[in-house]
């Protein structure tokens, strides 16, 4: 699964895509590489650590999953992904670390 932000939009919004893929987690930023704009777009959902890593609030990811995220099956698989991430040191105070992928050029 991955969180996407389309920075080319006037008002970039976060979307959770490939919600059933619990084997990988990343933040995909589409548009020109603009860290300040990406930070604003993330808002309260998380923060950029640097251009390659972000910390996203776990509860924000759950919210982005929408109705699917309210099912027992989805929550169980997501919790399993979080347990694995915690073993790897990718969980920090209610946040999960995500690798950033920039698509669409540089500023």
Image (cartoon, rainbow, N blue to C red):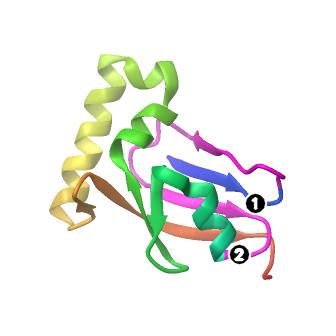
Q: Which mark is residue 34?
A: 2
**Residue 19 left/right relative to 55:** right
Q: Quadrant of the C terminus?
A: bottom right
Label 1 or label 2, whichever comes before in sequence order: 1
Residue range (magenta) = 9-34
| Residue that appears at 55% across and 50% down | 3
Viewer-side residue, 20 vs 16: 16
Crowd band around label 1 with a 10 angstrom C-alpha radius: few (<14), some (14–19), many (20+): many
Q: Is residue 34 above or below residue 16?
A: below
Q: How many marks?
A: 2
Q: Position of residue 44 (x, y in %)?
A: 47, 51
* SS class, disc 1: loop
**Residue 59 left/right relative to 64:** left
**Residue for badge 1:** 7
Quarter of image, res 38? bottom right
| Residue that appears at 47% across and 50% down | 45
Viewer-side residue, 22 vs 66: 66
Crowd band around label 2 with a 10 angstrom C-alpha radius: few (<14), some (14–19), many (20+): some
Q: Position of residue 104 (x, y in %)?
A: 80, 70
């Amino acid at each position: 699964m991955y969180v996407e932000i389309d920075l080319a939009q006037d008002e970039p919004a976060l979307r959770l895509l490939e919600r059933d893929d619990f084997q990988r987690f990343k933040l995909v930023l589409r548009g020109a590489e603009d860290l300040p704009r990406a930070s604003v777009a993330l808002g309260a959902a998380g923060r950029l650590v640097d251009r390659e890593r972000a910390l996203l609030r776990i509860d924000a990811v759950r919210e982005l999953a929408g109705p699917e995220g309210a099912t027992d099956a989805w929550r169980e698989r997501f919790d399993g992904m979080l347990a694995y991430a915690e073993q790897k040191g990718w969980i920090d105070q209610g946040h999960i670390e995500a690798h950033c992928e920039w698509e669409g050029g540089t500023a």
